[in-house]
Image (tube, grey):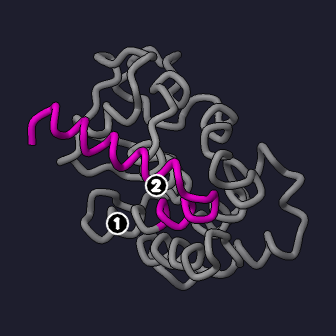
Amino acid sequence: MTVAKRKKVVAKKNKAFRRMTAAQKRVAIARDVIAAVQSQKILALSGTYVKHSGIDFNCVHEETSLQDLLKQNEGRCCEACAVGSILICAAKRFNKVSVGDVVDFGYADRSEAGIGLGDRKCFVKFLEKYFSKEQLVLIEAAFERKLTGLSLVYSEFTKSEEFQRSVQKYQDKSLSEALVAIMRNIIRNKGTFVP
């Protein structure tokens, strides 16, 4: 596919995506995550938001569109947790984030940086267009099966019974199975993760 044709396709998809309700957008993102996991474009990985072996961050400018960067590396697989998978699929669908918003460019060797290693609040701000902070914390807890990352930053959500159910819900599944099950939960509940 030529660059011009790809841009036209992306513009058409973005236009359709903008017309969706917030819940429809969450469902669309969840479906995209499932498709990416099943096609092995995303491998479930605990403890890291996104790690993309095809991207050398020494060669990437902070202003670069995350959507463009991901499209350029589309044939390559990346590793991601549940929230990282949502970030990838949301950025691919609706480009409103630059690489500098989600990558910590303070690393001495930026090739070691991964998406989401920067200020969590930056990429959470982007994801809040689709999912509430509480939903993101619950999704991450269900995938990671422990208090980590977002649940430490937004600890006000960790005291609920819902959070405890979320941590325990997918204990018996592999990471890939848990990721797909979480996304199916979002689809089944019309855009809301219900532990």
Kind of residue at badge 1? Val
Q: Nearer the viewer, residue 15 or 106?
A: 15
| Mark 1: few/some/many CA within 10 Å (<14, 14-19, 20+) | many
Of mark 1 and mark 2, the one earlier in the sequence is 1
> Which residue is at a point 69% across and 35% down the rendered structure image?
121
User: Which residue is labeled 1 in the image?
Assistant: 37
**Percent coordinates x, y for residue 168 in the rendering:** 69, 79
Element at badge 2?
A: helix
Above or below 107: residue 72: below
Q: Residue at x 69, y 53 (%)?
A: 148
In the image: residue 17, left or right of residue 189: left
Q: Is residue 111 visible?
A: yes
CA distance for labels 1 and 2 = 9 Å
Q: Main secondary structure of the magenta part?
A: helix
Name the residue that disc number 2 marks.
85
Magenta span contains residue 114: no
The magenta stretch spans which residues? Answer: 1-30
Q: Position of residue 18 (x, y in %)?
A: 51, 48
Q: Are marks 1 and 2 in contact (CB under 8 Å)?
A: yes
